C-alpha cells in the first residue's frame, strides 16, 4: 500500500482546522468549567495545539493512519481534567434542609398567644412541650400558650442553636395585654347619677354600657356602634359626666351641626341655651361659652383661635374622615385637641376600606401608641417598595381586633342589641341590557385600558374613575325606567346617586309625574337640609328623597321610608352601609328593602368585586359592615308590557303602507275594524314611528340621520 504524503501547506491547513474545532469545543463546555481554573489554564490550549501538531506530523508514518487517511480529521484530545468541572448543587442545599424556619407570635385572646411555625423543627417542639400552659390545636396544627409564659418561652427559643427565627409581638402591644391581665373590667360599679336625669332616663341598656365603657377609659375612646344606635346620646352622657373638664368642643361635618345643638337642647335641659355656641365663620369669636360646635372645614381655617382657647373635652363626630394624617383637616384637629384631657371619637365605620385608616384615630385617643411604620408592618402587611412603604394590605387582624377592644374602642351591631328592630333585605336588580348602550366604542376602549392596568396602581384607579363616569351616562336610560315604574307605586323611598346629571334626571322624572320630593346634595346648606329632612319625615305628600351618596350618607334620619334605592354603586362599602342606615335605625317599625341597580358590561363589574373585597378585610378586623351583598337576592329589571315594543307592530305598518301605495289590493273590513278599535295611546305611537324604532333598536338620532323613514 502506498504511503500517503502531505505537503507542508496541507499540514498547516489541517492544523488550522483542528485549532478551529478545538475552539468550538471549548466554547460549548465553557459554562461547565470553573472560571478560575479556566483563567489559570488559558495558555494551555495553545501548547496543546502545538503538541498535537507535532504528534500529527509524527503520526504520518503510522501504519494505521496510512491505511485510513481520513483519520487526520480527528480532533485533539481535551486537555481539561475532570476536577476542573463545575460541582453541582448538593441535595441538602437544593431541598432547603438548612433553610431558616420562622415562627410568628400573635394574640388569639386577651390572655393567650399563639406561635405559628413555617415548618416542623424538632428542637422547637421540644421547647413547646416544656411549657405547662401549652395547648395544641390538631386542626390548625398551631401551639398556643398563656401570656404569663411569653417571656420565658421566647428566651428559650432564642437560645436554640438551630436555624429558627421568631417574630415577636411588638413590645407596646405586649405591655397593653400584660397590663390588662391584672386590671378589672367591671363596668357595673360605675355610678351614672352625675349625668342629667333626662338623658339618663332615655338610655337603653347597651347605651348605658357604652357610657360606662367611656368613663372607664377616662373619657378617651372610640364609639364605633352601628349606625342608628345612638352614639350622640352616649357621647353627650360621657361629656356630662366629665363636666368639670369643660369647655366642650364638638367638631362635626357641616351638614349635621344643627342636629347636635338640637340634641343638646332636648336631652340636656339643665344646660342653658346661651351656653351653646355655633362657630359659623372665621370672623366669629368665642366668649365664655361652655359648648362650641364647629365644622371640620371652619376649624381648618380658624385653628389658631381654638388652639389658644383650649378645650378640656372634645367630641369628634364622623371621625373616619380623619383617616389620612397628611391632610390639613387632621393637622388642624390634632392641634385643637392637644390640650384636651378627654377625647371621644364617633363613627359607625371607623375604617372604610383598610386597617391603616384606623391609625390616626387610635393615636388621638390613645396617645403614645406604636409608631406609624411599626403599625403598618404589623397590621397592614407592610411591604418596602421602590418609592417607600406600602400599607394598603392587612395582617394579624385577630390581634388588632383584640387590641382595639381592650384599649379604646367599643362596637355593637343592631343585630346584637336590637332584636326587635325590623329586618333589612337587600336586592340586586340587573338593569335591562336592551336599555344600556354598551356598544359605544369609547366605553370599549376604556374597559380595555382598565384591564391592562395593575389593580392596585394609581393608573388603575384613575382609569376606573373615568370608566365610572362614562358608565353613568350609558346606564341612565335604564335607571330612569326603573325610577319611573317605582314612582307609579306612590311608595316613600330614598334614591341615592353620585353624579349630578343622574340626580337631576331623577328629579325631572318626579316633576313630570307630579311626585313630591326633596333633594340633598353638596350644595344644600345645613339649615336647608334640616328643613328638608323634617318635610320628608312629616309630610305624607313628600314621597321621594333624592340624595347624593357622598353628601347625605350620614347625620340624617329618614325613617319615614322603608325603601332605599342605589341608582349608582360607590366603591366604599362603609359609605354604602351608612347610607342604608338612614332608614334602618331606631324609630323604624317596618321591614326595610335595599335595592342596588347594577348594569353588566359597565364599571359596575369592577366596583362590585372591589366592594366585596373591602368588606371581607373589614370583617376580619371586627368591623362587620352588615352589608353582605353576595347574599342579596338577584333579579332582572322587568319592563311593563306597554314599554316593550314589538317588531310586529312596525312590520304591520310597513305592510299597510305598501298596500296603499301599490293599490294592488283593498284592505279588508276586518283590518279597518281593528284599526278603528286602536287606543289613543297606539294612535300616538303611529304618529311618531321613528321615535318608536329608536326605542326598540336602542339607537341615537345620529344613527338614523341618514335613513329616509316615511310612514305617511
Image (tube, helix red, strand yellow):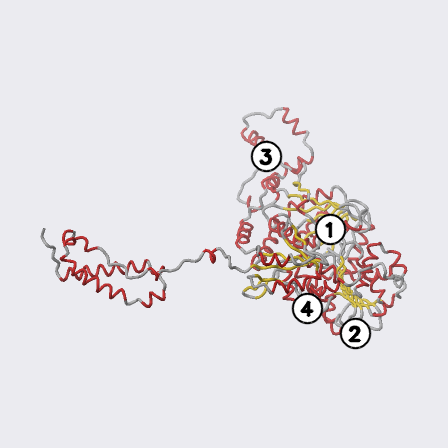
User: Left or right: where does residue 285 sit relative to residue 630?
Assistant: right
**Sequence-wise first label, 3 or 1:** 1
Tell me residue 167's x, y (percent).
Answer: 61, 62
Mark 2–mark 4 Cα distance, whole angstroms, equals 20 Å
Numbered disc 1: secondary structure: helix
The answer to the question of whether label 3 and label 1 lie on touching residues, with beta carbons closer than 8 A, is no
Numbered disc 2: secondary structure: helix
Q: In this view, does 277 lie above or below 118?
A: below
Q: Nearer the viewer, mark 3 or mark 2?
A: 2
Q: What residue is disc 1 on?
A: 580
**Sequence-wise first label, 2 or 4:** 2
Q: Is residue 598 above or below residue 387?
A: above
Residue 514 visible somewhere in the drawing: no
Numbered disc 3: secondary structure: helix
Residue 102 visible somewhere in the drawing: yes
**Sequence-wise first label, 3 or 2:** 2
User: Left or right: where does residue 386 sit relative to residue 397?
Assistant: left
**Sequence-wise first label, 3 or 4:** 4
The residue sitting at the top extreme is 669
Tell me residue 391's x, y (percent).
Answer: 61, 62
Could you say which quadrant of the image residue 336 lies in?
bottom right
Mark 3–mark 4 Cα distance, whole angstroms, equals 60 Å
Q: What residue is disc 3 on?
A: 647
Mark 1–mark 2 Cα distance, whole angstroms, equals 38 Å
Q: What residue is disc 4 on?
A: 328
Mark 3–mark 1 Cα distance, whole angstroms, equals 41 Å
User: On residue 339, which mark appears?
Assistant: none
Amino acid at each position: 500500500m502506498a504511503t500517503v504524503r502531505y505537503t507542508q501547506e496541507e499540514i498547516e491547513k489541517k492544523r488550522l482546522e483542528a485549532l478551529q474545532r478545538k475552539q468550538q469545543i471549548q466554547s460549548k463546555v465553557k459554562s461547565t468549567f470553573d472560571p478560575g481554573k479556566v483563567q489559570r489554564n488559558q495558555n494551555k490550549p495553545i501548547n496543546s495545539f502545538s503538541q498535537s501538531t507535532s504528534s500529527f506530523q509524527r503520526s504520518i508514518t503510522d501504519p494505521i493512519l496510512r491505511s485510513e487517511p481520513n483519520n487526520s480529521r480527528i480532533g485533539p484530545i481535551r486537555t481539561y481534567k475532570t476536577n476542573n468541572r463545575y460541582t453541582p448543587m448538593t441535595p441538602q442545599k437544593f431541598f432547603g434542609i438548612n433553610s431558616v424556619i420562622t415562627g410568628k407570635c400573635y394574640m388569639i385572646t386577651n390572655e393567650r398567644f399563639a406561635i405559628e411555625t413555617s415548618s416542623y423543627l424538632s428542637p422547637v417542639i421540644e421547647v413547646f412541650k416544656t411549657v405547662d400552659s401549652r395547648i395544641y390545636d390538631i386542626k390548625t396544627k398551631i401551639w398556643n400558650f398563656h401570656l404569663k409564659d411569653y417571656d420565658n418561652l421566647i428566651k428559650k427559643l432564642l437560645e436554640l442553636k438551630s436555624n429558627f427565627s421568631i417574630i415577636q409581638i411588638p413590645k407596646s402591644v405586649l405591655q397593653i395585654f400584660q397590663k390588662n391581665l391584672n386590671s378589672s373590667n367591671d363596668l357595673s360599679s360605675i355610678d351614672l347619677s352625675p349625668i342629667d336625669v333626662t338623658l339618663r332616663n332615655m338610655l337603653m341598656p347597651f347605651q348605658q354600657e357604652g357610657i360606662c365603657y367611656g368613663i372607664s377609659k377616662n373619657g378617651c375612646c372610640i364609639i364605633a356602634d352601628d349606625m342608628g344606635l345612638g352614639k350622640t346620646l352616649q357621647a353627650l352622657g360621657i361629656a356630662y359626666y366629665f363636666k368639670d373638664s369643660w369647655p366642650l368642643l364638638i367638631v362635626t361635618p357641616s351638614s349635621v351641626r344643627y342636629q347636635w345643638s338640637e340634641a343638646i337642647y332636648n336631652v340636656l335641659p339643665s344646660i342653658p341655651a346661651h351656653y351653646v355656641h355655633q362657630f359659623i365663620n372665621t370672623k366669629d369669636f368665642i366668649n365664655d361659652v361652655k359648648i362650641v360646635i364647629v365644622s371640620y372645614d371652619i376649624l381648618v381655617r380658624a385653628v389658631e383661635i381654638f388652639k389658644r382657647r383650649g378645650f378640656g373635652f372634645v367630641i369628634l363626630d364622623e371621625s373616619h374622615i380623619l383617616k389620612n394624617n397628611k391632610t390639613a383637616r387632621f393637622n388642624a384637629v390634632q392641634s385643637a385637641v392637644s390640650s384636651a384631657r378627654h377625647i371621644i371619637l364617633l363613627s359607625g365605620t371607623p375604617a372604610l376600606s383598610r386597617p391603616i385608616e384606623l391609625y390616626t384615630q387610635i393615636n388621638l385617643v390613645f396617645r403614645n401608641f406604636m409608631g406609624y411604620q411599626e403599625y403598618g408592618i404589623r397590621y397592614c402587611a407592610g411591604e418596602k417598595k421602590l418609592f417607600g412603604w406600602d400599607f394598603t394590605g392587612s395582617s394579624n387582624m385577630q390581634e388588632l381586633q383584640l387590641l382595639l377592644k381592650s384599649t379604646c374602642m367599643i362596637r355593637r351591631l343592631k343585630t346584637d342589641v336590637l332584636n326587635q328592630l325590623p329586618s333589612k333585605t337587600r336586592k340586586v336588580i340587573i338593569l335591562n341590557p336592551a336599555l344600556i348602550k354598551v356598544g359605544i366604542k369609547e366605553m370599549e376602549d376604556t374597559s380595555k385600558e382598565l384591564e391592562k392596568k395593575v389593580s392596585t396602581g394609581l393608573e388603575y384607579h384613575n382609569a376606573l374613575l373615568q370608566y365610572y363616569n362614562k358608565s353613568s351616562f350609558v346606564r341612565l336610560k335604564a335607571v330612569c325606567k326603573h325610577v319611573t315604574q317605582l314612582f307609579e307605586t306612590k311608595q316613600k323611598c330614598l334614591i341615592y346617586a353620585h353624579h349630578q346629571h343622574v340626580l337631576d334626571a331623577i328629579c325631572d322624572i318626579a316633576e313630570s309625574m307630579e311626585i313630591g320630593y326633596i333633594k340633598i346634595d353638596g350644595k344644600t346648606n345645613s339649615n336647608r337640609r334640616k328643613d328638608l329632612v323634617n318635610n320628608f319625615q312629616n309630610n305624607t305628600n313628600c314621597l321621594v328623597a333624592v340624595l347624593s351618596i357622598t353628601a347625605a350618607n350620614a347625620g340624617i334620619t329618614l325613617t319615614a321610608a322603608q325603601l332605599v334605592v342605589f341608582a349608582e354603586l360607590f366603591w366604599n362599602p362603609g359609605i354604602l352601609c351608612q347610607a342604608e342606615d338612614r332608614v334602618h335605625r331606631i324609630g323604624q317599625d317596618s321591614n326595610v328593602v335595599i335595592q342596588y341597580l347594577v348594569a353588566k358590561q359597565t364599571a359596575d363589574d369592577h366596583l362590585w368585586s372591589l366592594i366585596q373585597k373591602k368588606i371581607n378585610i373589614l370583617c376580619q378586623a371586627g368591623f362587620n359592615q352588615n352589608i353582605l351583598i353576595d347574599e342579596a337576592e338577584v333579579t332582572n329589571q322587568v319592563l311593563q308590557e306597554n314599554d316593550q315594543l314589538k317588531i310586529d307592530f312596525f312590520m304591520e305598518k310597513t305592510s299597510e303602507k305598501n298596500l296603499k301605495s301599490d293599490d294592488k289590493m283593498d284592505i279588508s273590513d276586518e283590518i279597518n275594524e281593528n284599526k278603528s278599535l286602536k287606543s289613543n295611546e297606539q294612535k300616538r305611537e303611529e304618529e311618531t314611528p321613528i321615535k318608536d324604532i329608536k326605542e326598540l333598536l336602542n339607537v341615537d338620532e345620529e344613527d338614523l340621520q341618514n335613513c329616509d323613514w316615511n310612514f305617511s
